[in-house]
Image: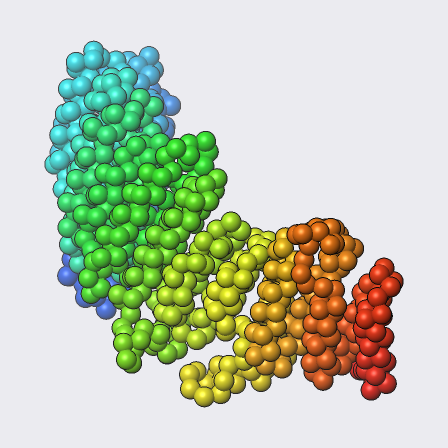
Amino acid sequence: AVLGSRGACSTCEDGGCKCAPCRRPPLRGPRLSARAPASAHPLGSSAMSKAATLAEGGAQQAALLEEALGFVAEQRFYLRKAIQHGDMEMALRYGLCLANELRSSKLLPTNYYKLYALVFWELQHLAAFTANTERHGWDIAEIYKLVQHEGNVLPRLYLLVTVGAVQVKSVSAESTCDTLDDLSSMLCGVQHPVRGLFLRYFLLQMVKDKLVPLRGARGALQYLLRGLREAASLWARLRLLEEGPLLLSGAATQAEEAGTWRLDPSRHALRLLVGAHISHAARLRELTVELHSEVLLPEVMRLSTGCEDAAGQAHLLQCFVEALPDSFHACTLERVLAACAQVQWAVDLRPLLQRLLRRLTAYTRDGRLEEGPGIFELFHAHLQQLNARPPNAATPLASLLELQLELLLSALELFQLDDLAAAHAADRTLGGAAELLERRLPSGEGGRRGLPAHAGVDGSGGGAACAARAVVALLAAPLARGPLVPKVLALPHHARLMAALGRTAQREGALAMASALLGGGVVLSDCGTLRRLIALLDRLLRDEGGSGGDPSEARRHLEHDSEAFVAEQEKVARLVHQVRAPDLDLTFRMLAILRGVFDEGGPHRAVFTLPALVAAALHLASGLLGTSPEGPTTDPGSPGSPKATVEEVLQFAHGLCSRLGALAPTEALRLWLLCAAVAGRAAAGSGSGERAALCNGFVEQALAALEAGAGAGPGA
């Protein structure tokens, strides 16, 4: 028997054979050579100008795909009819017609993928029919020899793989290995990047479930890596083709908008064909850490570092990191990071390292905390190498800062039970970020690094905005954990980071720090920590002046009804209630510090901050009286009793209410009454004449405010 148009008689080719030797259904489809696939010129040919391709390419691609899919649908019908009749030879002929359509080289990769998917599905039917020898009565070895008579290389290889994948199940182990090696070797005859990639992907799909039973874990892994080497080589060659019609694909635009690896359109569309080899290798159940370390890791690292362009290196590393389980990465992290350090400096490793660090952090959090310190040390050393690279040929500043932020967040997770280790990790991470900013940002006048708003990291540009957000997050991240706050604020790094920001970004950083303290319920219990925090929150505590700096900042103190301004001051007022200590004398001293700061903050901030300070003072007075929810700290008159008296605290509140009366009469009236109530309880409990006088004074002030019309204003 002969195959295809080469062996059919003239009657068969006309579709009406009645001769006894044939006895086959009429061949109604076109001859194998009757339809030439859409391959008038090679991919990226200069036969058509770029402008013409862009103008007409969309309609041309749609027409080419519709024509190819229509022909495949017709041949699919005849293939299934041949399978129903049990005619092996005719089924192979129509299978060749289907595979012949994959010789096209004018289709875009995305359209070629659609065509391949339809042909692949039909070849699966042919493979299932080939395996059922009882239906067609052929020996599989004869079929394997028969398909080798086809003249066109690509369809012949597709059928060889289809039949060969069935044959390996029915022969001895030695012959099976020879068949698999022959198939892999024969595929080298197709060196066109697109067609070669899909052909190797087809081989992978057909034999992936047969490798381990036939060759063992190591042999299967080596076979998959051989396919990966060839696929990676073809995939890398795609960038050498002219962009031509591939510019019509939106893949490149989408990649750039997503900020990923910036692959050219053709490689972006076909990136999964390369990653599938790594993915299947990682899914081998028999793959162990030793086998991964000895075979898989060295080969993938060699391929990634040996790729000639940055985008290709980044994608291969991404495939490797995404495919392998966390347990393998935890054991080989040092070698993976060493390979990342060897890639071209143009590769932005931020997305890759961020995902890897997050996965390993979650992995150690699930009961493997003993590996946490090693993970932090390795990543910190690697980031130090990235930070030390020259600015003109290094990872963007925003990406480096985001990596520092990711490392800090990871350290807080890894050392959640060890505050001392967490503080040490925060010291190293924040210090590294501060050194990076001081090295990358130019010095200002007189060598000072505090840059003006239009030149600093203030969000004025795309990269600067990302860098500013990363610095703001770095400032806030460690402050949500109470035991770390005194240790972290005692370091100089927060001040150095704030100095690198512009005025607007400094205010955002101060607001983020206040939000972190409130979100973590952090209690400020010593004067040193409070003073250092006040210095960092200066942008929220004082009205900006009208000279110099950003004009928008100079006008900001006039925007008393601004929603942003109100939200900021409400957070500052809430922060006042976090200032407390077991020692009531210490609490009183801290409230006095806040009063001095709020007095300098301007009248428009005072209407928010002074009421909160009065409320905190009254809470302190209740504590001294022993009527607060927490109860008295010590017994009155004991050696350890507070030195501050109720009278002193009430006088303190009296001064605050007096200053507030002219700014917010209605609020002042409410506070006068609250003070009178606390003073009345104090006088009733002790019978002190001084306390009674204070109570009368508060009542008089409240009546004066009421007579002045405070109760008739808004909010009365």
Which is more toward the observer, 313 or 100?
313
Tell me which residue sits at (43%, 58%) in the image.
Answer: 490
Tell me which residue sits at (24%, 64%) in the image.
Answer: 53
Q: Is residue 99 visible?
A: no
Quadrant occupied by the N terminus? top left
Give the answer, above or below, for where 704 lies relative to 652: below
Tell me which residue sits at (74%, 54%) in the image.
Answer: 636
Q: Is residue 20 left or right of residue 237?
A: right
Q: Is residue 382 left or right of residue 185?
A: right
> Which image quadrant is residue 468 in?
bottom left
Which is more toward the observer, 183 or 652?
652
Tell me which residue sits at (61%, 69%) in the image.
Answer: 592
Quadrant occupied by the C terminus? bottom right
Q: Position of residue 85 (x, y in %)?
A: 35, 22
Q: Is residue 416 left or right of residue 709?
A: left
Q: Position of residue 639 (x, y in %)?
A: 67, 52
Q: Position of residue 18 (x, y in %)?
A: 27, 24
Q: Is residue 185 visible?
A: yes
Q: How is the image coloured?
A: rainbow
> Which image quadrant is residue 692 in?
bottom right
Give the answer, above or below, for where 72 lies relative to 291: below
> Which image quadrant is residue 577 in?
bottom right
Which is more toward the observer, 426 or 236?
426
Q: Position of residue 601 (x, y in %)?
A: 57, 78
